[in-house]
Amino acid sequence: MVSRQKTRRTRFRVGRVSVYFHHTSWWIYHREGGRQVRRKVGNSREDAEQVAAQINGQLAAGAPTLLSFEPIGIPELRQQFLQYHEHVLKSSIATVTRYRAATQHLENFAAGASRRCHAHEVKVDALATYLRTIKVSPNGHSHSAKRALRDKGVQFILETCRSMFGFAAKRRHLPPYAGNPFAELPLDRLKIEDAKPIFVFDADTELAFFQKADAWAFPIHFTLAKTGLRVGELVHLLIEDIDLDGGWLHVRNKTELGWRIKTGTERRVPLLSEVISVLRLVIGNRVAGPVFLRERFRDGCLPELVGGRRELERACAQRERQSGGALSRNERLQIARGVWRDAGTIKADRIRITFVRVMKAIGKPEATCPKSWRHTFATLLQDANVDPLIRQITLGHKPTASTGLGMTGNYTHTRPGTQREQIENALRRWPKSLKLALTFKHGG
């Protein structure tokens, strides 16, 4: 008789949900979608009865139940998230690398817990506090001096974690009524107080830079300054991408050669006559290959691999076949980089080194990033009141909720002549540096 009374006290039903006491805790059991669901819900019978009532009502309504999710650890979730971007979305390898580095901080935080932490148990505020305490190497190299994460770094990590937890919610790894915990953080209002300062040239500093640059560095930085190209876009620029007679530079994806534009959006940029003169001298008698070659080829000797885009693609495909077996994206990227190297293209790091040296020589050692040319180009267009749509098209930016033109942008079509006229008017506001192109043309 005592055994029956104990059974009645420790096991009962609430509709389609069974509630029972086991090992000092209350549990519930039910079937959902043909699956058995068994969860521990607490130490109190009253709490277990309330949860059971909610789940019974949700089962009756055909809605997702309160506990109908599959808990997942942070390492497993991180691996699934990265594989999704790698193999499903085909995100660029650079993007996947940034996501891997950002989510590693979350995994390190979870590993420091006293017990194994599931994704739905992560304390977002505690993670944000943890990120403020750690020190990292700015360039990722183990021997670099470490410093605290900057505000933008913290913001990017939290934004990436928010995306990863959105991925987890769609795959039912989070409680269905809990929501994304990172969505509650006001990331758009995060104060950026210790960001790396951005250097923007003025006319005199630009002139001093070009006067100090050597014959190899001058055309590279002059082109960056007068086109607003990203450094990676200039490095992968082929002769066939430039229409010297028409005065246009085309920025194109080269996916078969392991490179694509940051936003994936191809565009064309108008060229000033001075830029055309400089590019003609750089290209010389060559008809194919990268526009800008490494310093060792400045005296007219040719690289190991000479050819246009089709020839480079064939060389890349041939090397992939010779490697044998199925190749990963990283392995294919390494082969493509080898093709670019053999074609004589310059390294982005080499451009940065020359930039730093010249800036030190003119008394501006605080400026260390060639992206300053792109910032300066955009600022010049702003100063000249260039139409926002033309600025967006020329710089290759994607429209955003705050800066986009909405449906107006879909109905507005920029004429090439209008784009050329406005860009040229803006760049000719600094005529002294443009005159240096004539000096370069005559061997000065």
Image: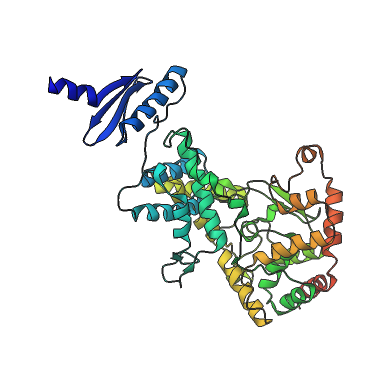
Image coords of residue 133 (percent x, y): 45, 64
**Figure check: 51 above or below 409:** above
Q: Is residue 358 left or right of residue 414?
A: left
Residue 3 x %, y %: 14, 23
| Rendered image coloring scheme | rainbow
Q: Is residue 101 visible?
A: no
Q: Is residue 207 above or below residue 250?
A: below
Residue sitting at x 43%, y 37%: 174
Displayed quadrant of residue 280: bottom right
Q: Picture coordinates of residue 39 (x, y %)? A: 31, 32
Res 197 visible: yes
- In the picture, measured across the screen, residue 347 lies left or right of residue 40, that is right
Q: Position of residue 186 (x, y in %)?
A: 58, 50
Image quarter hosting the C terminus = bottom right
Relative height, residue 244 to residue 356 (above, below):
above
Which of 243/79 is in front? 79
**Tag count in the figure?**
0
| The N terminus, quarter of image | top left
Look at 40% across and 21% down and name the residue there.
56
Query: Left or right: where does residue 75 sit relative to residue 221?
Result: left
Q: Which of the 4 image quadrants contains residue 413?
A: top right
